[in-house]
Amino acid sequence: MQGTGYFTHALCRKHEMGCGHPECPERLDAIADRLLLTGVADALLQRQAPEAPVADLELAHDRMLVASIRGLSEQVAEEQMAGGPAHLQIDPDTSLNQYTWAAALRAAGATLAATDAVMAGEMENAFCAVRPPGHHACRSQAMGFCFFNNVAVAAKYALERHGLQRVAIVDFDVHHGNGTEDIVSGDERILMVSFFQHPLYPYTGTENPAGNLVNVPVPAYTRGPAVRELIETHWIPRLEAFGPQMIFISAGFDAHREDELGQMGLLESDYAWITSRIKDVARRHAQGRIVSALEGGYHLDALARSVEAHIRVLADL
C-alpha cells in the first residue's frame, strides 16, 4: 500500500500549559477541522499513535531526563488531587500538567510508528499531528514548549532499529532547533538542514556548527522568495551529496507572516514549495520515504492552512 499516513492521538490534546499559552490543544483541533473541511482527511491513512517505548526515547535522551518528565507529571497529578496547582513550571515558557508524560509518549510514538510504516512500505510518507512539539528538547533538558525530541528520536530509531546508514532532518520552524542540534551534532550518519530567524529564541545556531549541520540564519521580515533561494543554494546541494535513505521533517509553521511568535513572511505556497523540494530529494535517494512531525505554528488559521498545503504535497493531492 502507498499513500500518506496521518498519525495523532487524543492524549496529545490533554497536555496544556495554562490559559492563553500559544502552544495549546486547539492547534490540533484547527488542523483536524481544516483537513475535514477540505476533504484532505479522506485521502489520508489515519492511524492512532502508540506510546513510545522508553528504550527508544533513550536513543536520543539521557535516562535521567526521561525519568524526570515521568516523575514530574505524576507529581503534578498527586498535588492536584490534594488541591494543589494544575501546572509545574520547568522554564519561563514551559510547564507540565498531569497528562504531559502521556502526551509526550504518544507524540514520540507517532514518529516511531510512522517510521515503521514507511520503512515497511505500508505508506510512502507520513505526517504526525502531535504535541508537545520536540525540536528544542535537548539530550538532557526539556525546554521551549518541548519535552522529548520527536524527530531526533525517530531519526536515531531509523538508524539503530532499521539499520539505515544515512538519514536527513529538515527543520523549517522559525526558531532554531537547538535540541535537535544538541542530539545529532557530529553524528555523520545524520545531516540536519535548517533555516531560522536570527536573532530569536533560543538565540543559538550560529556558533561553530558541526560539519553535519547546515544552519541558515535569516533576519526578521525575510519573505518566501529569499528563503527559496537560500534553500536552493544551501540545503539542496548538501542533501543531494549526502543521499539520505530517509528524511525527517521538523515541520514548524511559525515563519508564516500571520504568526506573531516570529517575524518572517512565509505563505502557504512557500510551505508547499519547500515540501515539494524535500519530496524531490526523497524520491531520488530515499524511495520517497518522509516522516514529518508538527513543531511550531501558533496562529490557528494560518497553521491549519499551512499544514493542509504541506500535506497536499506529501499526498500528491
Image (cartoon, grey):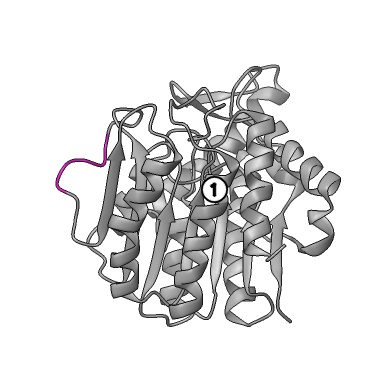
Vertical order, 114 against 196 (above or below): below
Coordinates of residue 194 in the picture (x, y in percent): 36, 50
Q: Quadrant of residue 48?
A: bottom right
Vertical order, 119 against 251 (above or below): below
- Along the horizontal axis of the image, is 58 left or right of 193? right
Q: Residue at x 26, y 42 (%)?
A: 205
Q: Quadrant of residue 188?
A: bottom left
Q: Quadrant of residue 58?
A: bottom left
Q: Residue at x 61, y 29 (%)?
A: 76
Direction front: furthest residue: 225
Foreground of the two, 236 or 245 = 236
Foreground of the two, 94 or 317 = 317
Q: Residue at x 64, y 82 (%)?
A: 121
- Along the horizontal axis of the image, is 176 left or right of 280? left
Tell me the magenta residue range: 204-208
Secondary structure of the residue carrying numbered label 1? helix
Can the viewer see residue 199 in this picture?
yes
Vertical order, 128 against 125 (above or below): above
Foreground of the two, 278 or 211 = 278
Query: Within the magenta stretch, is there residue 240?
Result: no
The dominant secondary structure in magenta is: loop
